[in-house]
């Protein structure tokens, strides 16, 4: 899964949590599963907003650090260059090549996790990473997370076009 | 996101749909977001079970094909070697290196999508892909899906250990 850094305003300060358990719900919304022990959850509930920031591999140390320390004990507000978008209460990370600010639209209450459904309000991306109005994932260089053995991986080469490579089986 | 092939028993026959919008909800359950137009949804609702199969890159053609044709018009039950596990109604694909059979525990009804929450009942994996009781993702060779430009990608190299590489920032 792609590793993301979730931004929220907690007790008046930007806070960031490293989360790979982000899913796609439909073409407008995403899910974000956060263990209830996280400090960030209160900020998401208070403001009804959060951000999803996609770090590149060169940010792997800071990304991992955000998952190692809690905002309860450590001020993470000066770790990155913060910026805000239309929602005003979803801090985003300038150093990340892509950012999404999201409005909380639903919360699914699981025993140990809050699953937040967020509607993507705006996506921010460095122009140099775009081609034909689409983000080029190869240039983003995302950090892929593997839970099994707790490791980060790089993206490899493009393999094929989707909704295309399988067409040749249609007439077999 | 990792590309998966979802298996369900629809009208008495194994059917398979290619879905990348699978998320992790907590340590026991996953989410599966399926547009309501899919033929597979009825089978998941009828039996309360489904499977998540992880294809390797060598299965890219058949994987893409499963996303190109609907079970409504095309019989996909003979495309793979099917097998069943404890749940009996969640067909799985022998050719995929890893399979999970899931019990439906919750459905979130979005306007155009059903989001199925599944509890993982059993995971099946080829022994040769395991080390210290953990699946080695590098050996699984998953097909990563990029929605932006509708493409499949390979996994690259391991970058770092999670919950570790960031430790050096702790005392800066």
Image (tube, coloured by chain):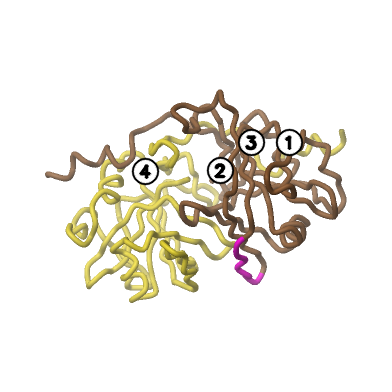
Chain colours: A yellow, B brown
Query: Are the residues flagged by discs 4 and 2 from a single subunit?
Result: no
**Chain on which label 3 sits:** B
| Residue B170 at x, y percent in the picture | 17, 45
Which residues are the magenta region? B105-111
Closer to the camera: disc 4 or disc 1?
1
Query: Are the residues flagged by discs 4 and 1 from a single subunit?
Result: no
User: Which SS class for mark 4?
Assistant: loop
Residue wearing tag 3:
B55
User: Around disc 4, counting alpha carbons within 10 Å, would you say few (fewer than 14), some (14 to 19), or many (20 or more)?
Assistant: many
Residue shown at 71%/34% (left/top)?
A: B61
**Chain on which label 1 sits:** B
**Chain on which label 2 sits:** B
User: Which SS class for mark 1?
Assistant: helix
The tag on residue B62 is 1
Residue wearing tag 4:
A56
Residue shown at 61%/37% (left/top)?
A: B124
Gap between marks 4 and 3, in whole Å? 26 Å
Q: Are marks 4 and 2 in contact (CB under 8 Å)?
A: no
Answer with left or right where residue A45 lies relative to residue B93.
Answer: left
């Amino acid at each position: 899964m792609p590793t993301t850094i979730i931004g929220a305003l907690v007790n008046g300060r930007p806070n960031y949590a490293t989360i790979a358990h982000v899913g796609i719900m439909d073409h407008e919304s995403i899910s974000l599963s956060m263990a209830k022990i996280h400090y960030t959850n209160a900020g998401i509930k208070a403001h009804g907003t959060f951000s999803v920031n996609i770090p590149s591999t060169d940010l792997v140390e800071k990304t991992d650090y955000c998952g190692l320390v809690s905002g309860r004990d450590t001020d993470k507000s000066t770790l990155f260059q913060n910026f805000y978008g239309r929602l005003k209460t979803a801090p985003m990370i300038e150093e990340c090549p892509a950012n999404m600010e999201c409005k909380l639209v639903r919360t699914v209450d699981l025993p140990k996790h809050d699953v937040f459904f967020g509607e993507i309000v705006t996506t921010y991306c460095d122009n140099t990473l775009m081609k034909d109005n689409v983000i080029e994932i190869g240039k983003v260089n995302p950090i892929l997370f593997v839970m099994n053995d707790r490791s980060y991986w790089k993206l490899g080469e493009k393999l094929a076009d989707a909704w295309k490579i399988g067409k040749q089986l249609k007439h077999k």
